[in-house]
Amino acid sequence: MDDNQLQYFPFHAINEFMLPEYRLHVLQSVMAGFDRLPGERRAAINNLIKRHMQVPGFRNSALAPAPVKAKAAVAVFERRPEFVAQILQGWSDLHPELRQKVHDFLKERQWEVLPPEADRTRLPGFLTTWPQGETYDVLGEAYAQAFPGDAVEENDLRLMIVWLAGRLPYDMDGDSGEEEAGE
């Protein structure tokens, strides 16, 4: 592939790499931590909820209780790349310590990543290439060695790697395009 022709998956392509119960967990954590998000993130998510989500019994779906809102948000998360981007940026905002550790970890491994606090919602989507040999298992073991005693949940680590790297593990830098399931 020519370096001038980067390929992107839309943000909602991440659904192919996430287990349904983990997707719901991420949505629940963002909805439950909503008040701790920066104002512009809350506004962006609320606008998308009002535009694309209908919670039975609520004229304004943004006012529904967090657990109810999270369940209703699954369908929007599966279809709307801009919603996925806002939710994942909000999720990373709610995990600043993990975000910083994963950023430092990826930089140490020579990955090209934006600064941890960068607003990745402005990107066109996820890059389709993944560094060769950097499987989830390899990265998980290396992270555990780099941060012994850090009891990060495996799916949280994987999601933070994907989000900070802006990549999905689809094409292992020139492989045949075989997907690595995970999350």
Image: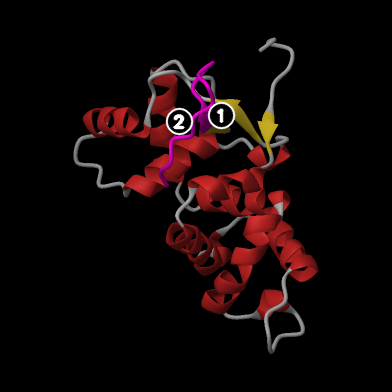
Tell me the residue that label 1 is attached to. Answer: 115
The Cα–Cα distance between marks 1 and 2, rounded to whole angstroms, is 8 Å
Q: 10 Å neighbourhood of mark 1: few (<14), some, or many (≥20)?
A: some
Q: Amino acid at mark 1?
A: Pro
Tell whether position 91 is magenta: no
Residue 125: x percent and y percent?
68, 37
The reply to whether discs 1 and 2 touch (Cβ–Cβ < 8 Å) is yes
Tell me the residue that label 2 is attached to. Answer: 103
- The residue lying at 57 percent from left, 45 percent from top is 14
Q: Amino acid at mark 2?
A: His
Q: Nearer the viewer, residue 75 or 85?
A: 75
Q: Is residue 174 left or right of residue 182?
A: right
Residue 170: x percent and y percent?
53, 31
Q: Quadrant of the N terminus?
A: top right
Q: Which residues are magenta?
A: 169-183
Q: Which element carries disc 1, helix, strand or loop? A: loop
Residue 18: x percent and y percent?
48, 50
Tell whether position 179 is magenta: yes
